[in-house]
Structures are given as structure tokens and as C-alpha cells.
Image (cartoon, rainbow, N blue to C red):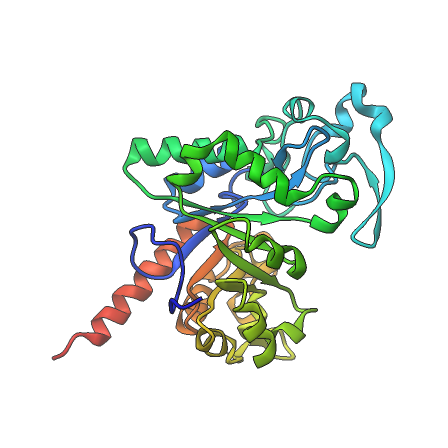
Amino acid sequence: MTSRHPVPDIGRAGPLIIAHRGASGYRPEHTAAAYELAIELGADILEPDVVATADGMLVCRHENELSATTDVASHPEFARRMTTKWVEGVEQTGWFTEDFTMAELRTLRGRERFPDIRPSSAERDDTHALMSLDELVRLVERANARNGTHTGICIEFKSPAYFRRLGLGLDQLLSDTIARNPAAFSSTAIMIEAEDQSWLRALRDRVSFHLIQLIDRASLHLLTRDGLQNIATYASGIAPHKHLVVGLDAEGRLDSETGLVAAAHAQALTVIVWTLRTENRFLPAQLHSSAHDRDLGNAAQEYIAYLDAGVDAIFTDFPDTARRARDEWLRSANANATPR
């Protein structure tokens, strides 16, 4: 990997805004409504998570268990498919994507993940159908052609080892999806993201897309110099949890930068931070607007903190808020750089 910041070139200046599961602060996640709104609000890239179906399709869902974000429990025809499984070391009871065909999943409707925090989005529950990755890439292809834009897609693959054991290799399902949609994939800036390091490394020789190593707070060993050098042998960038880039103090307030961005850039790795949200529940303590979780806080200052830290892109549920903060940050940076 030789380029300094190998983010897909989608024709826009400045750090990129990635719509996390679509505009999921306003619409139930991973629905066409969420993705279409994200495009309308100016997101540079859309981020779907994908898991596998029984018939080998990739469906846009954050996890394979369906009851938290769909109306599956209200479908009597699927009642007998409720079961208990171990997924990623956690026992879960519910309905699982790998037990449904894509046609069956299209009969379900999405629901808001945080109804207590996002009641306006929850009002749209049971309205929007689930989507396959095929449908999403075609949606983006059509939007780009219609609008003259270059919206990209960052696809996060969930639980590759789990699905491999079921005979549903996500790498092969990706290849199949590309084969069904060659024009859409060739015309769209694509990034592939995963937490599974071995799966991502193996994917390097199968695709030409930018690969992004997801890093949570339990994976600090990946953030050493050796760890970052290793990631740079197969990936173009890293996607760390936001507090691995700017920490929190003991009172939950934004603290100092950790130095991770500079260390990653020294290895020519892009840094994409996740996930920024607007409500008080998700903001550092000094940015709360009230004592109520659902109230909107001073999110702009959190975006500015990460932009000041030098990140290359930001995952957000609110692409409009992120874009305004990014544009203001760019104006300020340009004004400060103008010679007097």
C-alpha cells in the first residue's frame, strides 16, 4: 500500500462523511428510506452491514438476529423459526437471517433500534422493507447517474467465521453479488470493512477494493507499531472506535488525542472513526445539552475534535450534522491558511 491516504476518490474535498447504516438517526437502519435520505443529506459514502441468507444472498443487517430491528415476531408464518443459537460466543434467542431466503426477508419491515431515543424514526416502523446488497448497489448506481454524483459504499461484513461454518462463505457471496451487478460495482467507489483480521487478509487477493480493518476497544494489540505495520500489508486503512482516537477522562469528557491518527498515517493507513451520533446519550459529558438522553447535544464540537485529530472519514448516523461540521471546519482551516 503506497498511497498516503488511499480513500476512494469520489470527487469531494475534505474528510469524508460516511452514513452509518444510512441516515439511521432519522429512519430505521438499513432500509431504502435510510439510504436514500443519506444521499439527499449529502453523505459521501453509505455504510451497510451485511450478513447471509439461507439462499446465499447478502442482506443489509447489522446482525443476523432479526427481532431487534424488524417486525419478524409479528409474522405468524415464521413463528416456528424462533430458535436459540450461539453467535460470536453469545447465546441468542430469536430469528436468524440464515434461516430465511431473501424473498422471505423482503416480507419483513424494519424497525428503529433506539425507539426511546429516536421516536420520530420509530414512527416509521413496519413501513420499509429489508434490502439485499444487490438492491443497495443498484440504488446507489441509479442515484449517481441521476444526480451526477459519486456516492460510494463501505460494506461491513459481519461474523465471517460463523457463516463459513454454515457453508455460507461471505467472500464467495460477495463475488457472486459482484458477478450479478458488474456495472454497479465497477462504477461505484467501494470499500470493504471487517473486524475479522484473517478473513480480511484472505480477501486481499480476491478483490481490488480498499480494505478497512475494524478495530474496537478490545483490540488494542492492533494499534501498536507492529500491529499497524501488519495491517498495512493487507489493508488500506483502519476504522477504530472513536475513543481510541480521542480519549475520555474519568468524568466522561473529551480528553486528549491518543496519537493513533499520526501512527496510522505513518504506515499510509487511512483512519475512519466510528460512530458519531447527535443525541446526549452518545456524546461526551461536556457536550450534553440537558439531562435527557434523547435531547440533541452539541454534536458539532465532537465532529470538530475528530477532524482536528486528522481523521480521514467519519461514520455517523446524522450525515447532515456531520457535513455542516465538516464544511465549517474546512472554512475555518482555509481562512487560517490564507496569508494576510
* Residue that appears at 31% across and 33% down: 145
* 52 left or right, relative to 294: right
* 6 left or right, relative to 156: left
Task: Tell me which corner region of the image, top left, top right, bottom left or bottom right, holds residue 217.
Answer: bottom right
Taking the image as drawn, is residue 60 in sight? no
Q: What percent of the width, then of the height, locates residue 319?
A: 43, 50
| Above or below 68: residue 125 | above
Q: What percent of the width, then of the height, locates residue 301?
A: 43, 67
Task: Tell me which corner region of the image, top left, top right, bottom left or bottom right, holds residue 252.
Answer: bottom right
The C terminus lies in quadrant: bottom left
Taking the image as drawn, is residue 149 in sight? yes
Q: Residue furthest front?
A: 205
* Residue that appears at 52% across and 76% down: 260
| Above or below 284: residue 97 | above
Q: What percent of the width, then of the height, locates residue 150?
A: 34, 43
Q: Nearer the viewer, residue 98 or 254?
A: 98
* Residue that appears at 37% across and 60% down: 325
The N terminus lies in quadrant: bottom left
Q: What percent of the width, then of the height, locates residue 84?
A: 88, 40
* 12 left or right, relative to 132: left
**How many numbered callouts?**
0
| Above or below 312: residue 309 | below
